Image: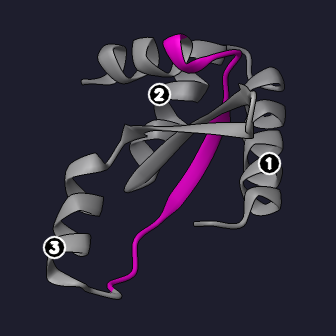
Amino acid sequence: MDNFDELRDLAADVRAFIESSRDPAAALRDVVAAYDVVLGIYPSNDGMGLHVVKGSSLLDRLATLQSNALYTHTAVAVQNREQAVQLQTLIA
């Protein structure tokens, strides 16, 4: 997941899906439910900030086991880290 262009593309796809939905909140819930890992991406002084909105325990487990197991992931664009943390709290 270190390819920032891929994350930007994923976030653009998610944004388009949500914007085309009759119920944006339900669309966002569907996106979050459909993936093992959801990253909040936002502009930062370093270019792009990342916050794990969903799946941090899975990523921790995989790192501990040094596993190359497959998992699904996507990205959601947010304005800042605080919004990513709020989204994380809302879906917990």
Quarter of image, res 48: top right
Which mark lies nearer to you, 1 or 3? 3
Query: Which residue is rendered at x = 35% and y = 88% of the image?
Result: 68
Query: Which residue is rendered at x = 58% and y = 66% of the image?
Result: 1
State the separation of the CA atoms marked 3 and 2. 29 Å
Q: Quarter of the image containing the C terminus?
A: top left
Q: Mark 2 points at which residue?
A: 29
Which mark lies nearer to you, 3 or 2? 3
Give me the disc on residue 54. none
State the separation of the CA atoms marked 1 and 3. 27 Å
Q: Mark 1 points at which residue?
A: 8
- Residue type pointed to by label 1: Arg
Q: Is residue 79 magenta?
A: yes
Q: Name the residue under label 3.
A: 64
Quarter of image, res 50: top right
Q: In this view, does 9 lie to the left or right of 85?
A: right
Q: Which contiguous range is marked in magenta?
A: 69-82
Q: What element carries label 1?
A: helix
Please tell me which residue lies in front, 1 or 26: 1
Expressed as whole percent of the image width and height from the top left, the position of residue 35 reads: 45, 53
State the separation of the CA atoms marked 1 and 2. 19 Å
